[in-house]
Image (cartoon, rainbow, N blue to C red):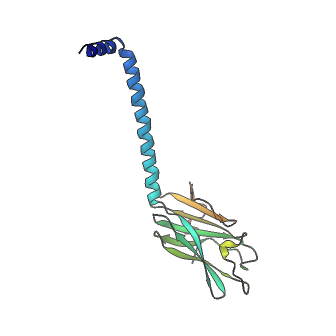
Amino acid sequence: MDWICTAVSWLDNNSAAVMAIATVVIAYASVVSSRFVCLEKKIERANRMPILTFADERTDDHRSLYVKNVGYGPALNIVRNIIEPGDLLQTRPQDPLLLGSLAPSERVYAYAATLPPNSSVAIVDDPRFHAVVEYDDVLDGHYEFVYQGRTHSKPERITKRKMPPNQARRA
């Protein structure tokens, strides 16, 4: 019982130190909880974010290129723009094309290319192939991904679309 009286007496004599320690503990707990809230928001955004990629398919004398949603949320107002790809595709430059919307795991036809005879090279394997795709998510966020040099960029959030859907050529 004597140690309790000693502890109470010490706390009474050092109340400023106790308050300082309590303030530090509360501040640390606030920082930790705000980090958890930020992490939860990132996880929530990832759970509803559409992620688009290209899929290539050979049919007879041409290759078809598809845009596929491999994310967890729907992609809205998809517009693709293919930059002059070079000799492999033997076509003229493409105008921006409105592809519509895609639910998760759906794909939509985006491009066809005539191939040279006996060619087995996929459209996306041509190092000169360069395409840009812009789309929206359900919370009106705008995203863009670039395919160039056989690699996809991560979907990047953009503030304003460069290729508005209402100005794209319709299929």
Note whether residue 70 is visible.
Answer: yes
Coordinates of residue 30 in the picture (x, y in percent): 41, 35
Q: How many numbered tags mark residues here?
A: 0
Quadrant of the frame with the C terminus: bottom right
Q: Is residue 121 above or below residue 31?
A: below
Q: Residue at x 44, y 58 (%)?
A: 47
Report if residue 139 is visible in the image: no
**Which residue ends up furthest to the right in the rendered image?**
87
- Left or right of residue 52: residue 9: left
Q: Position of residue 105 (x, y in %)?
A: 48, 71
Say above or below: 60 vs 153: below
Q: From the viewer's perspective, tell me whether residue 114 is left or right of residue 164.
A: right
Residue 5 percent coordinates (x, y) = 26, 13
Q: Quadrant of residue 15?
A: top left
Residue lying at 54% horizontally and 66% vertically, measured from the top left = 52
Q: Is residue 134 above or below residue 59?
A: above
Nearer to me, 31 or 103: 31
- For the N terminus, the image quarter is top left
Q: How far across and how far down the image is residue 98, in percent?
A: 56, 72
Q: Residue at x 48, y 73 (%)?
A: 106
